[in-house]
Amino acid sequence: MNTTDVRWCVLIPCLNEEAAIGRVVQSVLALGVPVIVVDDGSDDRTPEIVSALPVTLLRHPQRRGKGEGLRTGFREALRQGYDAVLTMDGDGQHLASDIPRIAAAAQRYPHHIVIGARLLDREQQPKNRRRANAVADWGISWACAQPVADTQSGQRWYPRAALDLVDLPAENFVFEAAILIAATREKGLGVVSVPIASRYQGEFRLSHFSPVRDVARITFYTVGQLVRHGDVVASYRRSRASRPIVFDTAVT
């Protein structure tokens, strides 16, 4: 697999994913893609499982949150000379089989963040998560001044311009929202979505994302960014003027 001359890797931040992490990493390696795993202070067998695989493994001695996991991975990717990073979670909800379509979208839209958007089988998503995600999509699209589908998905392609935002002052799940807003506002990037399935059935561990606490943090941050950029009414109009860009061409 390749996207022209872009050097890229898959980044998997994880915390206590011993049930799935080996399968997830091996499925990515089967595509011939290099992998960076950031273990956020797991106290199960996650680091032991990953260390036996041909990947770059970085470990936090204690838990620092998903934002710091992504930040550590971005810095390592930049140190190794990668031009882009494709992130995915380590619990098995993101599939390596979706990676070729995401990479194809990145090739088609080189100045965009590409989101693996959970637009298929949405009835699988718990109602409280669906409502929380809808609120987040509405607010973050407004802050980005463009429509964005599934702003809470962790399966994303970040081009180099987005990686350069690694030092944004945001933590935990807010970091992913901060990257979207800063990349669109300060770097002029667009956002394109690749439809993936909503996967909530099966033996997934409980999500580290709290629909109340984390949505509140994201909302507070997003409102602050709207105020900071100032063009509140114009931003809202731009976010509602069109539908999100969706790339849905099958890759064989």
Image (cartoon, rainbow, N blue to C red):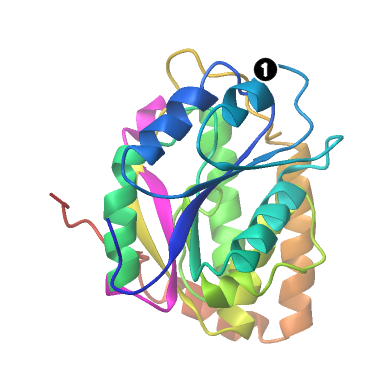
Mark 1: few/some/many CA within 10 Å (<14, 14-19, 20+): few
Residue 115 sits inside the magenta stretch: yes
Q: Which amino acid, mark 1?
A: Arg
Q: Position of residue 101 (x, y in %)?
A: 27, 53
Screen quadrant of the N terminus: bottom left
Residue toward you, 88 or 216: 88
Q: Position of residue 157 (x, y in %)?
A: 46, 60
Relative to 25, 70 lies left or right: right
What's the magenta region?
Answer: 108-124
Residue toward you, 104 or 130: 104
Q: Quadrant of residue 219?
A: bottom right
The residue singled out by tag 1 in the image is 45
Q: Is residue 173 above or below residue 3?
A: above
Relative to 200, 73 lies left or right: right
Relative to 42, 153 lies left or right: left
Residue toward you, 95 or 121: 95
Q: Position of residue 122 (x, y in %)?
A: 37, 35
Residue 40 sits inside the magenta stretch: no
> Residue at left 39%, top 39%?
29
> Residue at left 77%, top 69%?
167
Q: Position of residue 191 (x, y in %)?
A: 44, 69
Q: Is residue 4 above or below residue 197?
A: below
Q: Is residue 171 above or below residue 28?
A: below
> Residue at left 56%, top 48%?
152
Q: Secondary structure at mark 1?
A: loop
* Residue that sits furthest to the left in the current view: 252
Mark yes or no: residue 197 visible. Answer: no
